[in-house]
Amino acid sequence: MSLRQFISSRKILRSFNLVKESATLRWREDAAIFGLQDDVFENPRHRKLSRPVTVILVGAGHRGSIYADYAAKFPEELKIVGVAESNKERLAKTKLKF
């Protein structure tokens, strides 16, 4: 069978679907081995924090601003008490924003 015949017969689409189903099934099996569930918050072993985690940002670049945004959105989970940044512009921007 030529490649053209193979593609035209749509067997390639069925084989991609098989790969997708196989990968999904394999992930569910692996997740079950490690005790992972679809929703972490439904897990009975997950406990709410009694107080927010206190952190100091080391760097106010992209990753630091993501953590700062998270802290602003969920203050009951994360509290930023300081920022260490050598770039004065980034430090000033972070200071104004948060």
Image (spheres, helix red, strand yellow):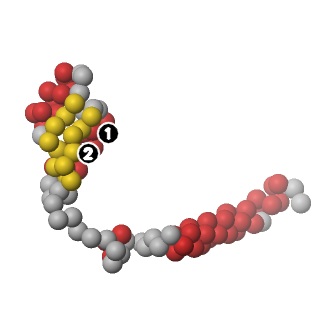
**Residue 15 or residue 96, whichever sits in front:** 96
Q: Which image quadrant is residue 80 in? A: top left
SS class, disc 2: helix
Residue 58 location (% of width, % of height): 27, 34
Q: Tag count in the figure?
A: 2
Rendered view: 80 above or below 25: above
Q: Amino acid at mark 2?
A: Tyr
Residue 71 location (% of width, % of height): 19, 50
Residue located at (27% from left, 32% from top) = 59
Left or right relative to 29: residue 69? left
Which residue has dot 1 on it? Answer: 63
Q: Which image quadrant is residue 94 in? A: top left
SS class, disc 1: helix
Disc number placed over residue 51 in the picture, else none: none
Which quadrant: the N terminus?
bottom right
Label 1 crowd (10 A; few <14 / some 14-19 / many >=20)? few
Disc number placed over residue 67 in the picture, else none: 2
Rendered view: 71 above or below 89: below
Whether residues under marks 1 and 2 lie with C-beta atoms below 8 angstroms apart, the answer is yes
Farthest left residue? 96
Residue 55 location (% of width, % of height): 21, 45
**Residue 7 or residue 58, whichever sits in front:** 58
Which quadrant: the C terminus?
top left
